[in-house]
Image (cartoon, rainbow, N blue to C red):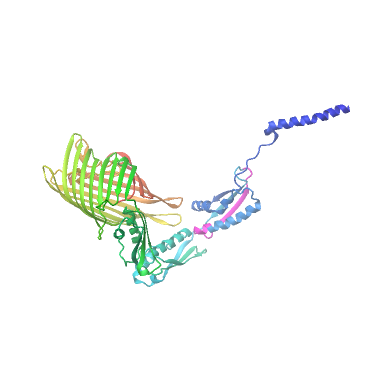
Amino acid sequence: MLWARLRGLAALPALFLFVVCWLGANPAQAQPAAVSPRPFAFTVQIKAPQAVHDYLQRHLDLQRYREVTDLDKQELARLLTAAERNARELLGTLGYFSPEIRIAPRDTPESTASARDVLITVDPGMPTRIGAVEIAFSGPIASDSAAAAQRAAIQNDWQLRPGQPFTQAAWEDAKAGALRALTARRYPTGELALSRADIDPDTRTANLSLTLASGPAYRFGPLQIDGMKRYDPELVERLARFPSGDEYDQARMLEAQQRLADSGYFDSVFVTLDTQGDPQAAPLVVQLREATLQKLVLGVGISTDGGPRLSVEHTHRKLPLLGWRALTKLSLDRATQSASTELTAPPDADNWRWIASGLLQRQDSGSFKVTSQRLRGGRSWTTERLDRSYYLQYDRAHTAGDGVAETADAVSANYAWTERHFDSLLFPASGHGLAVELGGGITLGSSREPYGRVLARWLGYRPFGEVRADSGAIRKSRLALRAEGGAVVARDRAQIPDTQLFVTGGDSTVRGYGYRDIGTQLPGDKVTAGRYLAVGSVEWQRPFVHNGRFTDWESTLFIDAGAVADKPRNLRAKVGIGAGARWRSPVGPLQVDLAYGVQEKSLRLHLSVGFTF
């Protein structure tokens, strides 16, 4: 009996080993499935008006602690107390100083996201609005009669008016705008001496006061040029055009910097005012890095007017012996193939330059192919706001298509004038521009006939409504009004080159129609260039708001109309209507338009980049 018991005990280790091995082979049956850890210690739900909800969702400090999964209830309670204070501070920046805030945590054992849920309910109450506004000045600006207009402009352009909602962001923007207006003219060292926003929670008003300290008035002194090696320093003086002794004007200084940068002679330009010395003759420091003597640029692109485009451009900035700049360009796309060269002299003391150019081009014009040559020589005078030029020009054009082949030559004397009064030459929102070309010439060949030519373009921006963001900031909508007209006056028998006549249609003229597809109607629905041109456009441009904030986008609605004919009485407008969008890209406005050509009965997409006038 004892032996049998001992044999049974001896079998226990073997049985134990068997069970262990069996359990190791079946782990799922050996222990319950592991529970996946929850990713958040708690989740946050915010119940509030949309603008308040989005703002708290982005900035509430409590959101940062959701992933701290080892929080106990005491630590969470402390965080929720701090969250209420933080929410009140955030709502104060939006102008809500008496909000009702309720924070209710609850356990959520059934949730796979977190063990707790925090519901934050916010009733922001009535917003605080601007009450009294006081803007004061100290320093020379306070008593200088010459600065009266500047003082009035700062006060009149103040962004926060009585009755508008108060927000911290709008308050900061308004102060920054006033300081920019102070330092933009006469007083570059001006500063904000005092700013105060007195909030009355009972009346929900914010009384604002600030004092702007001007510092001394400055005048431009001599140029100090650093970085010139290849070119004569006189070139910088003529391009910058800074008369010594003029009152400091930041806009003029930046325009001079832009003139130097746009001249093509320099890779980088930085202009600053030295405020350490005599304010009545503060030096302008011009730091330059000269561009290479020659440059080759290969370009590819695409446009809805011409399709894919390939270009090759070579620049020689200082031709041997002559010293002029030469720009040679080859450009190929579906509608136009061209080769050109242009020689430009450095500006003289009065900013006039000699110019000479030549152009070989083949271009789609209406229903025909036009192969042309052009030679031009004259002088030009160019600034940011005003261009003038006069020149002699020779034109030769060969028009072919549908069994027609005609060649016409002419020589003409021309004068061109362009004036721009836009608030910005890159992203204009107000102002106007006008361009006029006048010319007279004579046709060559077997029949010599005189002719006169005129072309005028006008573009204006007019306010038309406004858009308000949740912060209270306002941007104006506007109408862009465009008109263009041209005429060539000559006897009917005069053979004038097509390049001196008119066609229209495309991205920048009449949308809804193809590039240069609107011209004089010929039998068989053929289109050719005509002697009279009329184009008009009305476009409504409206700032776009997303999530209560202004973006770099605008929406547009437009109607275009254009006509070309050989007789004024035969002008028949072709109309395009549509909608589009504008984006403030780094190189200028990107325009995307979908237009319907009423006469064509078809939709066209139009794309273009940049603003030129």
The residue nearer to you, when weighing 585 against 283, is 283
The spot of residue 221 in percent (x, y) is 34, 66
Observer-nearest residue: 223 or 571?
Answer: 223
Q: Report the label total.
A: 0
Place residue 513 in its image quadrant: top left
Give the residue drawn at x 46%, y 56%.
471
**In screen coordinates, is 207 left or right of 533?**
right
Of all residues, the one furthest to the right in this rendering is 1
The stretch drawn in magenta includes residue 97: yes
Query: Which residue does the image show at 88% across and 27% down from the upper left?
Result: 1
Rendering coords of residue 61 (x, y %)? 56, 54
Magenta segment, which residues? 90-110
Q: Nearer the viewer, residue 588 or 89?
A: 588
Viewer-closest of 307 and 380: 380
* Residue that sits furthest to the bottom in the current view: 143
Q: Is residue 430 visible?
A: no
Q: Is residue 441 left or right of residue 596?
A: left
Give the side of residue 439 with respect to residue 241, left or right.
Answer: left
Is residue 400 visible in the rendered structure shown here?
yes
Residue 302, how many percent across, how many down?
34, 41
Q: Is residue 176 left or right of residue 534?
A: right
Tell whether position 197 is magenta: no
Residue 468: horizontal and vertical position, in percent? Answer: 42, 55
